[in-house]
Amino acid sequence: MKKWCLVLIFLGAMACSKKEIVIADINLEKWKNDKFGCLGYRNRTLDAFQKSKEKLLKMSEVNIMAAFGKPDKAELIEKSQKIYAYYLNGNTNCSNFNDSDSLIRILHIRFNSTGYSNSLLVFNKIKE
């Protein structure tokens, strides 16, 4: 009985551990340091990100946050689902924000109620 308890504890610990996400052609440390996309690094890596989109689906919220850092914006929606938003080309939080830019690019990662990503969308928001 004791042996089975240890096996279950070990398996539980393995299930909760973080998987390191590696995306070709993206330096995830630079991505994390590019808060709100102010430095432009996130926007320059969009093509590489799009190629790895399938790899990121069904990843846990913990793994996504470990890879991409704290989201620029998080929203709790119906039935305990979440959306993490990462700005790609800057917004009004940036000191170098160009007010003449009419579009703001945003990556949305949606998580289901069990904490796994089920949708990744990049969209352009028209500045108001």
Image: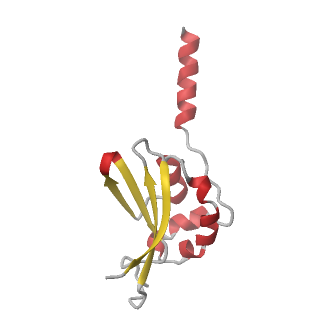
Number of on-image labels: 0
Is 8 above or below relative to 101? above
| Left-right relation of 47 to 60 | right
Residue 75: percent from left, percent from top: 34, 58
For the point 57% across and 27% down, the residue is 11
Q: 39 or 55: nearer the eye?
A: 55
Q: Residue furthest right?
A: 24
Q: Residue furthest top?
A: 1
For the point 50% across and 60% down, the residue is 120
Residue 71's quadrant in the figure? bottom left
| Left-right relation of 25 to 9 | right
Residue 101: percent from left, percent from top: 43, 87
Q: Residue furthest bottom?
A: 100
For the point 50% across and 71% down, the residue is 34
Residue 49: percent from left, percent from top: 60, 65
Residue 21: percent from left, percent from top: 61, 52
For the point 44% across and 45% down, the residue is 115
The quadrant the N terminus occupies is top right
Image coloring type: secondary structure
Q: 59 or 39: nearer the eye?
A: 59
The quadrant the C terminus occupies is bottom left
Residue 102's quadrant in the figure? bottom left
Q: 16 or 110: nearer the eye?
A: 110
